[in-house]
Every structure is written in C-alpha cells, then in structure tokens.
Image: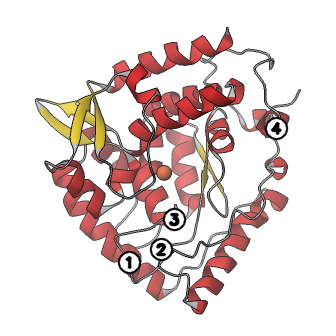
Amino acid sequence: MTGAAMLTESVTTSEPAFSVDNIHISDADLPPFNDMPFEDIEELHLDHPGASDLEYRKRRDYIASLSKKFRETGVITDVEYNEDEQGIWRHVATRLEEMHQKHASPFYLQAKRDLGISTERIPQLTEMNRRLKELTNFRLAPVEGLVDTRAFLSWLSWRTMLSTQYIRHHSRPEYTPEPDIVHEAIGHIPMFTNPNFADYSQFIGHGARIATDEQIEELGRLYWYTVEFGLVEHEGDIKAYGAGLLSSFGELEHAFSDQVERRPFDLEQVIDHDFTYSDMQPVLYVIPSYAELKDVTRNYISRFKG
Ligand SMILES: [Fe+2]
C-alpha cells in the first residue's frame, strides 16, 4: 500500500508497522499531494468575524483557491498580500513579538530568529520552505482550510506541515477561530527549524498513520496540549512553546494568569483529557524539558505497533 492511500479514512491497525525513528524523508518518499481527499474544507463558518464581509469572503476564497491549486500542480503560489493584509500582520506580529520576549520559551525565540520572519511583512510559504529545507528538511504544503486530525498529523510523518495562506479579518486582529497565516507562521512554523521538535512532530505523524480511531483521539489531545498549548519549565520559570498560545495575545496572557491551572505534564492524563476549541484553555500542561517530551512520545507511539 502506498503512503498516500494510508491518508484515507480506511486506515486500520493492520497497516504494516514501521519504525518511529525513520526521520530521513526525501522528496522521493512523499505521497502525491494530489491524493489529499479534502473537500469543502475552505468553507467559512458563520461565527467567523469576516462571515458577513463580502469583500473579505471573496479575498479569502481567492487565496484558498491558490492553496487548493497546489494539489493539482505541486507548485506553491506566492500570495500577493495587499496593504490591508500586511497591516494586520504588522499589528499582530509586533504586539506578539513584545509579548514573546516575556513569555515565550528561549527555544521558540531562537527558532523564530532562525526562521528569519519579520514583523514588517507576511512571509511566503516558499521562502520559509527554503529555510526549513536547509535546517531540518521539514516542508510546508498549502491547504485551503482545517483538515481532520488524522490527515493533518499523518503528513507530519513525511516532515510536512499543511498550512493555510489567508489572514484573519481586520475587525478582530487578536483572534481567529480558524488557522490563518499568523497562526501558522508565528505559532507553528518557527518550531520546525529545531531538529528535536521536527522529530517530535514526525513521531506524532507516524502514530497518526497507524492509530486506531481511539488512538487518533488520544494523539489529537497530546498534540493539543503540547504543540498547540504547551508550557515548559525554564530555569525555575514557566514559558510558552505552544502555537495556539504564541499566536494569540489573549491566550498568552491568560496562560500566565491565575485563571489557568498549570499541571505537570503526565502523558496518561493528557491523552485522556478532552479539550474544547473555546479560545481560553482552563488547564495547561508544563513539560520539564523537550528531551523528556520527545522520549515519552517516542515510547508512546511505539506502543501502537502491538
Ligand atoms: Fe495550530
């Protein structure tokens, strides 16, 4: 069976097991991108701040169509962002940069420098791809909306992250109910410049390809409480490394307030801890170190093979 076929919903535990350590993925190993079975994922929900703004919807649809075209051509189209879009980026990226100095883990701050993005303009997936290739051989593939957990995580096993290209609505610069280029390029993408984090993501991807339906739920929770909303100990202090925290002023401030219960990371507890997509998380988990998270995750995923 090809890797691409594993991405369909018919994945079962009878798939051949493979090592979670096969971290060397080349272009030749990739399943064809045109095999991604995503339909109607570009739909904008009625609770989106731009839902009744026809001009915004048209622009978002256009950028989504460029992302979708990638699956036919295999070529990423750079988006010519307009001045309004650049303005939203400058506003959000500048404010987040200030907050990161206080709350982000040094690991993330270094990763952001290594990626080389600027608060001045929206980075293109193509330029970030060039940088990731040099550093960790991770890559980005455009996608026009939020895909299901198994598909999204499975692509990480090929050191590939699916990424949206459009930007949030100007009326709520601090908030987006769906992934957008701010969430991807400020929250997620810097972390892939770090080899350990890239490997960690890939372990999760391996797991997603062979997980049972129950295990994929668990993996989704592990991903949520680490990659999206993770905190880490640092020299007696607590810092943020989760993309959902680092790309939202509100979440980042809230994460360090007394309204949040910050628990020591415990794998069994995390994979059992249901979450909601509401924008404020009541409980967050603090890992002691990335090395420990990587070890625990590798061991956990290897249990899937049995
Ligand atoms: Fe995310």
Residue placed under numbered mark 1 in the picture: 172
Labelled pair 2, 3 in contact (Cβ < 8 Å): yes
**Mark pair 2, 3: CA separation:** 6 Å
Q: Earlier in the sequence, mark 2 or mark 3?
A: 2
Residue at the spot 57% in from the left edge and 51% down from the top edge: 130
Q: Amino acid at mark 2?
A: Arg
Tell me where residue 201 appears, x and y as whole percent: 52, 33
**Residue kind at label 4, given as amino acid type:** Ala
Amino acid, disc 3: Asp
Q: Residue at x 85, y 36 (%)?
A: 5
Instruction: Quadrant for residue 220, please give it.
Output: top right
**Sequence-wise first label, 4 or 3:** 4
Q: Which residue is mark 4?
A: 4
The numbered mark, 4 or 2, whose residue comes first in the sequence reads 4
Q: Nearer the viewer, residue 43 or 109?
A: 43
Residue tagged 3: 180
Q: Quadrant of the C terminus?
A: top right
Disc number lying in front (1 or 4): 1
Cα–Cα gap, marks 1 and 4: 37 Å
